[in-house]
Image (spheres, rainbow, N blue to C red):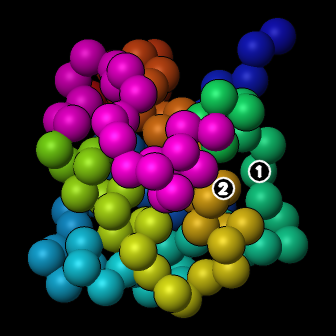
Amino acid sequence: MTIKPEAIKDGIQFWPIPKTSAAEAAFGLDENAYFNRRSLPEVPREYVNAVSNLFFNGGQLPQLAPGVDAREAAHRLRALLSSFAPPHESKEATAAYALWVWSTPEIVQAAA
């Protein structure tokens, strides 16, 4: 059995991509937009690596599922990664989970 991500996990909405303001993109999101450091979900390594690469090196998003607006996804990821509020582990896990959701066609299509 393959584990799939959820559109809403632990009260955090991932799909549809929440609207992100310019201020959030510049200064980051509130701490309640992230997973709790003590109860992080399992996320496939490829998405954690992608987030780490984006965080430290910049670059392009991985292939997203059809129907995902890459600009919205990039805007949201920027907000997730630029916040000083959460611990790094929470930030990394939340951003990786978002990429996982946005890269899973079944989730995107089911919630469309």
Residue name at image x 41 percent, y 28 percent: 62
- Determine the secondary structure under disc 1: loop
For the residues marked 1 and 2, what is the alpha-carbon distance in whole angstroms?
7 Å
With 40 as the anchor, is 28 left or right in this view? Answer: left
**Dot 2: within a 10 Å radius of its alpha carbon, few (fewer than 14), some, or many (20 or more) residues?**
many
Q: Give the residue at the far front of this rendering.
A: 57
Q: Mark 1 Cα within 10 Å, few/some/many (few <14, many 20+)?
A: some
Q: Is residue 58 magenta?
A: yes
Instruction: Say whether disc 1 or disc 2 marks the residue closer to the N-terminus.
Output: 1
Residue on which the image places disc 2: 93
Residue 89 shows up from this direction:
yes
Quarter the N terminus occupies: top right
Mark number displayed over residue 41: 1
The residue at 31%/85% (across/down) is: 27
Spot occupied by residue 89 in the image (x, y as percentages of width and height): 73, 67
Amino acid type shown at disc 1: Pro
Q: Where is residue 85 in the image (x, y as percent from the top left)?
A: 54, 89
The residue drawn where x is 72% and y is 31% is 44
Q: What amino acid does circle 2 point to?
A: Ala
Residue plotted at (34% across, 69% down): 79
Quarter-of-image position of residue 59: top left
CB atoms at circles 1 and 2 under 8 Å apart? yes
Compared across the picture, whether 8 is left or right of 49 comes to: left
| x and y percentages locating residue 43 in the rendered image | 72, 39
In this rendering, the answer to whether 19 lies above or below 54 is: below
Q: What stretch is highlighted in magenta?
A: 49-70
Residue at the top extreme?
1
Q: Is residue 38 left or right of residue 2?
A: right
> Relative to residue 80, is residue 18 drawn left or right?
left
